[in-house]
Amino acid sequence: MTRTVNIGPVSVGPSSFAVIAGPCSIESAEQFLPTAEFVQQQGASIVRGGIFKMRTEPGTFQGLGEKAFELVRRMKDQVKAPFIAEVTDPRQIDTLMPIVDCFQVGSRNMYNYELLKELGQYKVPVLLKRGFSALIKEWLKAADYLIKGGNENVILCERGIRAFEGPLRNTLDLASVAYLKQTQELPIFVDPSHGTGRPDLIPAMARAAIAAGADGIMVEVHPDPSKALSDGFQALNFDDFQALMDQIQPYLQLANRKLSHG
């Protein structure tokens, strides 16, 4: 039986289905606040937004850092949605603590055991993304660092692995989702944005994630993906996100799940 993890007022676990949505990076008030408001209106219950970004190229946008904090506070006042952001360094935990309702550990940091040990000292939920070359057993052992440290509020997130993907950014391993739903108790999300790198494939993978038993999805949404400062090529625009939310409804009904609401 899947355990329940609460992210603010949102329950993640059996019978419910939570959607995390928002931009890859918080860029400005004009970009972030309307996006947060829109995704919530369409049924997303948790807002995402990158503050400290891990980028492959050092010269690319690394996030606003602490300059984004006031925008998150404004979002919480206006939209009143819980917020998730990636933490990339143990020194950021206390800095982010006042504004986040859930920490995200990204794919590159799944093996950052010092970060996991530190996050294990807190009760704040952690969404743990699978390393893009990680075995399932390595992923679960990374989760054990959090749990054995004292934090049982852990959510797994399948975000795609490296394989012979060709035109795809990654290969979304939905078999791992079905397997983990049968063999362990942690809730599991699917990230079809990183899992494919293609907005046109996100709806199909989201529907498949529901069929595989996922407890939620995380998707990137931007008002104008062509102008995004990071990962715009895989972000949904507003119209496409609205269409996605409409498309998953019948699949949620078949799976006897309802969208989580705060």
Image (cartoon, grey):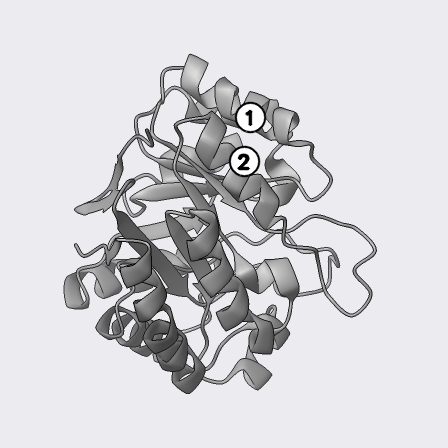
Task: Name, please, the residue furthest toward the front.
Answer: 254
| Image spot of residue 150 (x, y percent) | 36, 15
Amino acid, disc 1? Leu
Residue 225 as seen in the image, left or right of residue 170: left
Residue pointed to by mark 2: 179
Local packing at callout 2 (Cα closer than 10 Å; few below 14, some 14-19, many 20+) is few
| Image spot of residue 171 (x, y percent) | 69, 55
Query: Which numbered disc covers residue 176?
Result: none
Local packing at callout 1 (Cα closer than 10 Å; few below 14, some 14-19, many 20+) is some
Q: Secondary structure at mark 2?
A: helix
Front residue of 112 and 158: 158
Residue at the spot x=58%, y=85% of the render? Answer: 226
Residue at the spot x=42%, y=19% of the render? Answer: 147
- Depth check, mark 2 against mark 1: the one in front is 2
Visible residue check, residue 182? yes
Instruction: Quadrant for the N terminus, please.
Output: top left
Q: Secondary structure at mark 1?
A: helix
Visible residue check, residue 105? no
| Image spot of residue 242 (x, y percent) | 35, 80
Residue pointed to by mark 1: 140
Instruction: Quadrant for the C terminus, please.
Output: bottom left
Front residue of 130 and 118: 130
Amino acid, disc 2? Tyr
Residue at the spot x=69%, y=48% of the render? Answer: 161
| Image spot of residue 98 (x, y percent) | 27, 42
